[in-house]
Amino acid sequence: MVEPAVSKKQTLPEMSDNGERRLPFTDRVTLDAVGRTIVNSWTSEHLARIAEKSNKHFQIAILPTEQCNFRCTYCYEDYRVGRMKPEIVSAIKCLLRQRIGDLEALTVSWFGGEPLLAKDIVLDVSNFAADLASQHARLAYRGGMTTNGYFLDYETASALADCGVREYQISLDGPREVHNETRLRADGQGTYERIWANLLAIRNSSLPVSLLLRVHFSADTVPSLLPLLEDIKTQFLTDSRFSVAVMPIGRWGGANDAAIQLMSKDKQEQAIATFLRVLFGENVSSPQNLSRMDGYVCYASRSNALVIRPNGHVGKCTLALYDERNKVGTLQPDGTIQLIPGRLAPWLRGLETLDPKVLSCPLGGMSTQPDALSAVADGNCTHGDSNNGEAVPAKPQLVQIEF
């Protein structure tokens, strides 16, 4: 077993006001070689409770490829990392095999690039995970995918449902003429018709799936969005398997960031309120409205959630793929994780403070040094703001973390 690495810079415990030992955060919470949360015995009780609960649930986001058949105008990915090699697929299976026995819940999420460009890997690993889960009666297994929807036809959705991949996020940027300006294929062709046809085919089926339609908007597209919302309301919201989240486009680090017109928070809120009235009328508290998530805790803040890239790099965030701070370790051939000293702790600092701003996006306010063990308090994360479409509370409030 590969032991998790820790920083050599901070090894001596500090002393709290009552004379008890207080370790630097990097030593208080870490992971063992297969992703179990470790909390030192003299740390706070709430961290110990978090560790106990989190070790019963393991969540991994797998990128089987970082290639994509789309070239969305606001995308932040560079597509340089290609398809996952067989040895990384094998290592993921080894990791799952080592963790499965002590879990109550396993969540495997698929991301990219476009994950369905590597559909065979998705099916292979998902079938493996489903088979493992079937051997443990008390284990709840969930599979999900963030996909552009272009390849998600009925046959593919059916095959994925059979191995437990049943939760989807699919983005739409407006009606046909708007969507086809921003969510283009790599060859410059539009994508709306194919995605819409796939959504209708799934709606007309009895597949046991759930689909979150992420409707993006910007200052330029607000006036043009209403026809799409009317179509979503009539075509999909009569089916409880479908839900909607309306979210503003942000500057997420892509080549076209400068061309994106940002909206003030007030204007974003006004637009979202208008959109939600179209979708839900007075029933904005509908369970199909996922545009607002109060008390949102980002998966990157959770000690039991990891991202595995095609090259075997282990991270915490699917947006900051090219940020060195997000490479917290490497997946080894035997399924163990070799942590990089000092990289994990800043992502988990919200578990100690319970500050909702940090928990909603730990990248916000993090030191710019990849090996730093501390973070400044006044930072801001565009991912956190744009991921759930809401302003993070300015004043820290205690929140409860559910695993």
Image: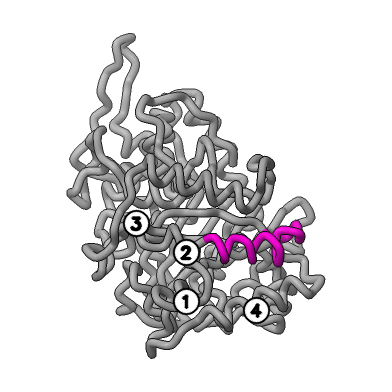
Q: CA distance from mark 3 to mark 4?
A: 27 Å
Query: x and y percent of residue 327 in the render?
Result: 31, 59
The answer to which quarter of the image holds residue 143 is bottom right
Left or right? Give the position of 294 relative to 328.
right
Above or below: residue 11 compared with residue 327: above
Identify the disc placed on residue 224.
2
Reading the image, the residue beneath label 3 is 250
Count residues near mark 2 (Cα–Cα under 10 Å), then give few for <14, some for 14-19, many for 20+.
some
Reading the image, the residue beneath label 4 is 198
Reading the image, the residue beneath label 1 is 177
Query: x and y percent of residue 91 in the render?
Result: 49, 71
Q: Secondary structure at mark 4?
A: helix
Q: Nearer the viewer, residue 92 or 251?
A: 251
Count residues near mark 4 (Cα–Cα under 10 Å), then give few for <14, some for 14-19, many for 20+.
some
Left or right? Give the position of 11 relative to 387.
left
Task: Give the residue at x 65% y 80%.
Answer: 197
Type of residue at label 4? Asn
Task: Give the residue at x 50% y 62%.
Answer: 225
